Image: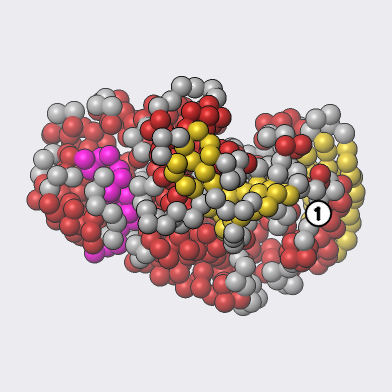
Amino acid sequence: MAAAEAQIYEFDEFRMETGRRVLSRSGEVVPLTPKAFETLLHLVRHQGRVVDKDDLIRAVWSDTVVEENNLNQNISALRRALGENPKQTRYIITVPGRGYRFVPNVRTRTPHPATASLRTVAVLPFKPLVAGHRDEALEMGIADSLIAQLSNSRETIVRPLSSVRSYTALDQDPVAAGRELGVESVLDGSIQRDGSRIRVTIRLARVADGASLWVQKFDQEFTGVFDVQDTIAEKVVAALALRFNYEESKKLTQRYTENVEAYHQYLRGRYHIGKVTLPDIRKSIEYFQQAIDIDPTYGLAYAWVAEAYRRLPITSDVPPKEAFPKAKAAATKALEIDPTLADAHTALAFAKFWFDWDWTGAEQEIKRALALTPNSGEVHHGYAVLLSTLARHDEAVAEGQRALELDPLSLIVNANLGVFFHFAGRNQEARTQIDKTFEIDANFWIAHLVDGKIHAKNGDYLQAAAAFARAREFSRGNSETISMSGYALALAGERDNAQNVLNELEVLSLQRHIPSNSMAVIHAALGQNDAAFARLEQAYQERDVRLSFLNVDPKWEIVRSDPRFAELVSRLRLKSAV
């Protein structure tokens, strides 16, 4: 929507921002699909008047022909989002035989021209001033810190580290990178630590024409690195004419530690956790812990300890009972130090729904994180994972698409949007999304895993097995990739080969933790239901992360009619089987 058309509509405790396409309630984002947002917007703009169904359909679906049922579904979704129930319609009144009327008084405001549309910025990983003298943890870490500082403005979308971390080549053209990232401005810098001194050259460029908006050099003691970062952040804000409220201004130069060595250890931790392998995640925890040992009040370091531990079970087959209590303890400590740490709220949300199966508590935590950082692709992605798990598919897809808008080159955001489509039964859209993920990185193992699941759902079991084999290779043996190979082979009629995969997992389980869920799915595909449910019971006792997806993952359709399935879903406190 063009800036001139941007408006803010307010009614009761709700606020609609057309520029950002966001509905919020008391400061918390209310997830809506794009079409649901447009439906509500049309009703709000015609407040007090009856809007005919045909007119509403033409306004919302101007580019296609749809049935009245599509409108009915949107109205139902809106009523749920607004908190209505069949006995109380405070907002949307049905006028029989005609259409709908939006009831409450609406207040309209025109945003300030500077805030009518969000500004988009990318901060690229810094480069060494002298080739051959790289400190990638420092180069990546300084960029990550600036991303965090600039992201405190609600007027600004700053591409996260996951989208920019590949732009590390010494000859990288920053303007070209900015175009690929779809931003208006790009911040590019060179850095070198020489003994006790730090040298930095920084440039903010406009992507449209490559013009420099601001250039500066720094040469000072490394202990002044915080002052350098603060100056850079403030200069970018001034160059882009961004406006910060009081709280955002405080966070722009907020220092989570005053200890430079603790900060340096934290940067090393952030560098390693981004590699998403078991050795690197373990190494990141060591660095974060060293930062905490130096400064026990370093709340942000605690938050990333929590994030590291919560990633281990899903990526590296670490026992959930080993990882999640540590994740929860670290997140809780982080929030005791600083309740506004969105990263800690997000990590705690994952722990609550992947380990505690506390769906309500998880949603409260993730909404708190969204309220703190509404333009964070990582938080929108986390919310999408939760919504998908709860079979709230339209909401999950909408959140996943929002995460992709904010973080367009993130591999996990791209691949998981394919998962959300797959779980929603929209396999063709899942296929399109996974193909887009392969365009970014043809070797990303999760994309191959999803690729295999799409083939399996379509009945192409041998193609599925081949995709799972690629996922296994690129993941270096993640147990789910192995088990899904056995699952596909069993459904293809290759029972002996499927049994061999099951035997392999049994042997591996003597060497390291193999989730029981990984054996259960092969038993199920072989028609061995008693063995499958015995393994699922073990998975329940293990608090297996992937049990969270039991109710929505199509691979379990082969045992869904068994009464034991519904009983297990009930114990997981999920809705009845879909």
Q: Quadrant of residue 203?
A: top right
Where residue 391 appears, x then y in whole percent? 35, 47
In this rendered view, identify the residue nearer to me: 230 or 348: 348
- Labels in figure, total: 1
Where residue 487 appears, x then y in whole percent? 22, 38
Q: Residue at x 66, y 49 (%)?
A: 9
Where residue 44 appears, x then y in whole percent? 59, 44
310 in magenta:
no
In the figure, is residue 346 to the left or right of 547? right
Quadrant location of the C terminus in the rendered image: top left
Colour setting: secondary structure
Q: Residue at x 62, y 72 (%)?
A: 338
In this rendered view, identify the residue nearer to me: 307 or 372: 372
In the figure, is residue 518 to the left or right of 293? left
Amino acid identity at mark 1: Arg
Where residue 22 appears, x then y in whole percent? 60, 47
Work out whether 557 lies above or below 136: above
In this rendered view, identify the residue nearer to me: 311 or 511: 311
In the figure, is residue 71 to the left or right of 409? left
By secondary structure, the bulk of the magenta-drawn segment is best described as: helix
Q: Mark 1: which secondary structure? A: loop
Q: Which residues are magenta?
A: 541-557
Work out whether 411 lies above or below 221: above
Work out whether 180 lies above or below 229: above
In the figure, is residue 209 to the left or right of 479? right
548 in magenta:
yes
Q: Residue at x 57, y 41 (%)?
A: 49
Quadrant location of the N terminus in the rendered image: top right
Q: Quadrant of residue 360?
A: bottom left
Mark 1 surroundings within 10 Å by alpha-carbon count, few (fewer than 14), some (14 through 19), many (20 or more): some
Question: Which residue in the structure is indicated by mark 1?
Answer: 243
Q: Residue at x 53, y 26 (%)?
A: 58
